[in-house]
Amino acid sequence: MYTHGHHESVLSSHRWRTADNSAAYLLPYLKPGMSLLDIGCGPGTITADLAAIVSPGPVTATETSEPLLELGRAEAARRGQGNIEFAVADIHRLPFDDGMFDVVHAHQVLQHVADPVQALREMRRVCRPAGVVAARDSDYRAFAWHPELAELDEWLALYLEVARRNGGEPDAGRRLLSWAQRAGMTDIAPSASVWCFATPEERRFWGGMWAERIVESDLARQSGRSREELTRLSEAWLSWAASTDGWLIVPHGEIVCRP
């Protein structure tokens, strides 16, 4: 189960993502003419960026349902990016032939799936022998922020609880190397990077997004907490965003594997 759901507060953060701020580790491996599979494309901003880089190579973007694919289609149409096809797919059983793609990519996906090792096996299967399998996931317990508000500690504990109850692993970033090894990968380049939110504009974006998400998204409904409790956490995010010395990082693990 996808813990966050698809409330506008969730989608706003997804639309903020670009190849530069979310897939920089992969960009040196990309060349025009490559075929690329983007798993869990969401609203398609990263997908469209990657498609522009590998153009005229074909890109296939997947999501778990047809309505979710409409978000990616709309972004591709908005940009006039014509080399992207869209398909419904389960990462545990990808509906593609062996060795079909030069690049197989998943951003913030493995932390939400039931069996990330099987997912990586499937990503490996559909990748060409000389291609690359790439994944990037955040690591929630490694988030760091200032000022240290007790309510944000509560928010983190709540998120970890709900995500794991849904069968996910919110500390996926630190586990990517281990999962890739268990999936049979031997040529693995691990790395890490962070998102940092410290300017007034960045704090307004991140704090405001989470202030709304914690009370309005699927996470709120799954939490089992009262509206009053969630509102208190929401207000803490707004308090953090208003701090002139507010600072927050979201660490990510990354892997680039040669099948």
Image (cartoon, grey):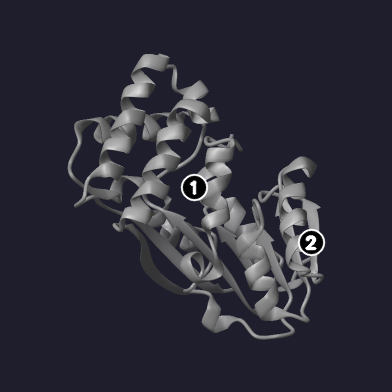
Vertical placement of residue 75 versus 205, above or below: below
Residue drawn at (44%, 59%), measured in percent from left and top? 176
- Going from N to C along the chain, the mark reached first, 1 or 2, is 2
Q: Nearer the observer, disc 1 or disc 2?
A: 2
Assess disc 2: are there few (<14), some (14-19) or many (≥20) residues with their C-alpha within 10 Å of its C-alpha: few
Please state the horizontal and vertical placement of residue 140, each as a whole percent of the image. Answer: 36, 46
Residue visible at 31% across and 54% down in the picture = 200
Does residue 128 appear in this view? no
| Among the 4 quarters of the image, the one containing residue 122 | bottom right
Judge from the rendering whether residue 47 lies leftward or rightward of residue 3; answer left or right. right
State which quarter of the image contains the N terminus: top right
Q: Residues within 10 Å of mark 1 (few under 14, many from 20)?
A: many
Picture disc at residue 77? 2
In the rendered image, which quarter contains the C terminus? Answer: bottom right
Residue 182 lies, with reference to residue 206, above or below; the image says below
For residue 39, say whether it is visible.
yes
Q: In the rendered image of this protein, does residue 34 appear above or below residue 124?
A: below
Quickly name the residue at label 1.
111
Between residue 171 and residue 49, name the one nearer to us.
49
Q: Is residue 151 left or right of residue 4?
A: left
In this rendering, position of residue 71 left or right of residue 28: right
User: Are the residues tagged 1 and 2 within 8 Å (C-beta)?
Assistant: no
Residue type marked 2: Ala
Answer left or right for 257 relative to 70. left
Residue 165, image x, y percentages: 46, 28
Q: Secondary structure at mark 1?
A: helix
- Image point (40%, 34%), residue name: 211
Q: Secondary structure at mark 2?
A: helix
Residue 175 position in % (x across, y down) = 40, 55
Q: Amino acid at mark 1?
A: Gln
